[in-house]
Image (spheres, helix red, strand yellow):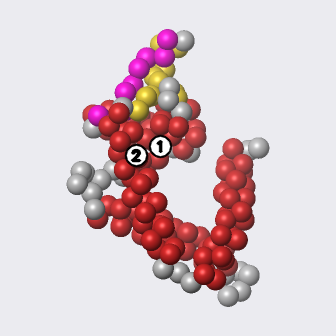
Amino acid sequence: MTTEEFPDSLAGVLAGVQRMIRRRLRDGLTTPPLRGAQVELLRLVAAEPGIRVSAAAKELYLAGNSVSTLVNQLCQAGFLIREVDPDDRRSALLFPTPAAGARLHAWQTRRGALVREQVERLTEEDQAALAAALPALRRLAENLHEEVEGT
């Protein structure tokens, strides 16, 4: 593989792995699946309860109206609670429901088991190569994040 081909190959492999994980996790669901953006928003709200819709949009790199649509969907599904911000009555604060916590926990448990199972099928050399690549992949993710944030 040439130096010119590497970035496209890396991006393709990372996207393919993520897509296959999502697909495999959807197979065993007993409830309607959530879309990727819905899960991302739920994960963010669970990590930062009380986050404003505008802050969530900025963090997820989505338009405010797109996040508002996701919020409406997730509130209707019983996964989010939207409250008026007491400091700014024009803004809404988002909180996860217990159902959201249970759904996220089940998803994380299933994802961990799936990835663990697949990694264990690899040779020791491949496992070591993946482990050695993690710091570089984290730096890549941080660089992408910083570039978008402008820091």
Look at the image and tell me in which quarter the C terminus lies: top right
Quarter assignment of residue 137 = bottom right
| Crowdedness near tag 2: few (<14), some (14–19) or many (≥20) residues, C-alpha within 10 Å | some
Residue linked to disc 2: 104
Is 50 positioned to the left or the right of 81 in the image?
right
Q: Which residue is outermost to the right?
A: 151
Look at the image and tell me in which quarter the N terminus lies: bottom right
Q: Nearer the viewer, residue 37 or 105?
A: 105
Residue 147 rendering spot, x and y as whole percentages: 72, 51
Residue 16 rendering spot, x and y as whole percentages: 48, 71
Q: Establish if 7 lies above or below 60.
A: below
Residue 131 rendering spot, x and y as whole percentages: 65, 70
Q: Nearer the viewer, residue 50 or 121?
A: 121
Q: Provide the residue span drawn in magenta.
A: 78-86
Q: Which residue is outermost to the bottom?
A: 1
Mark 2 belongs to which amino acid?
Answer: Leu
Q: Earlier in the sequence, mark 1 or mark 2?
A: 1
Residue linked to disc 1: 43
- Verify whether residue 79 appears in magenta: yes
Q: Residue at x 53, y 37 (%)?
A: 47
Q: Residue at x 42, y 66 (%)?
A: 114
